Image: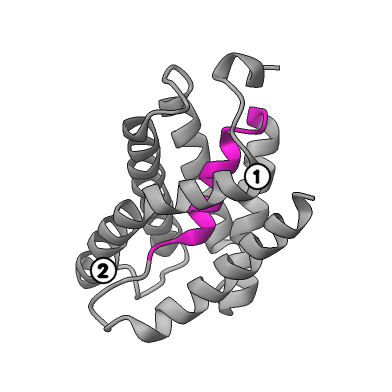
Amino acid sequence: MILWRRIVFVLVVLGAQGVMGVVLPVFVSPPDLFLLTALALTSRLTPLWTLAVGYGLGLAQDILGAGALGFHAAGIMAGVLAAGFVQRGLSNDNSVNNALGVVAALLVKWLVFIALGYWTRLDAMNLETLLYRFVPEIITTLLLGPLFFAFFNWAFGKSRSNEDRLF
């Protein structure tokens, strides 16, 4: 019965991520729905599976976006790990907890992007990229976050408590 909700969720996320990149103005970076999906799954999985899912979703984003393979995968995996550290001691039902997790994940994701960009000598990692991509992405992701997490809970049900996820 809940399978159709999950299918609708996946289709809406894939469609929305693709459409927002085209519809939004150039100076407004679309929210990272793949990162939000990985973060929503952290409240339902153990830490080891969380890293695997974060890497898998990032790799899917690289493949669908025709980017450098592993770039988003490493960033989302590191962001999910950071969010897991931030959220472990807090309640699952708190909007502040979700916002702290999103901010931590975005900061670490972009730190990994900067490190990978420097390591691979990628010219796209400069101050202009940080100002016109990073800052708007944080704002749009934080604004869309509460609606996204409510949609995720509709599709997958309520999450377990932190104590249940430790093992």
- Location of residue 27 with respect to 147 vertically, above or below: below
Q: Quadrant of residue 103?
A: top left
Residue 45 counted in the magenta span:
yes
Q: Nearer the viewer, residue 52 or 147?
A: 147
Could you tell whether 165 is left or right of 25 in the image? right
Outermost residue, top direction? 163
Q: Secondary structure at mark 2?
A: loop
Q: Residue visible at 63% across and 29% down?
A: 47
**Highlighted magenta segment, given as a residue range:** 31-47
Q: Nearer the viewer, residue 8 or 16?
A: 8
Residue 135 spot, x, y in % from top left: 23, 60
Compared with residue 43, is residue 59 higher up or lower down, i.e. above or below? below
Residue 146 image position (x, y, % from top left):
38, 47
The amino acid marked with disc number 1 is: Phe
The part of the image, by quadrant, that contains residue 69 is bottom right
Q: Residue at x 38, y 61 (%)?
A: 118
Rendered image quadrant of residue 50: top right
Q: Above or below — where is 72 with respect to 51?
A: below
The quadrant of the image that shows the C terminus is top right
State whether residue 129 appears in this view: yes
Q: Which residue is mark 2?
A: 126
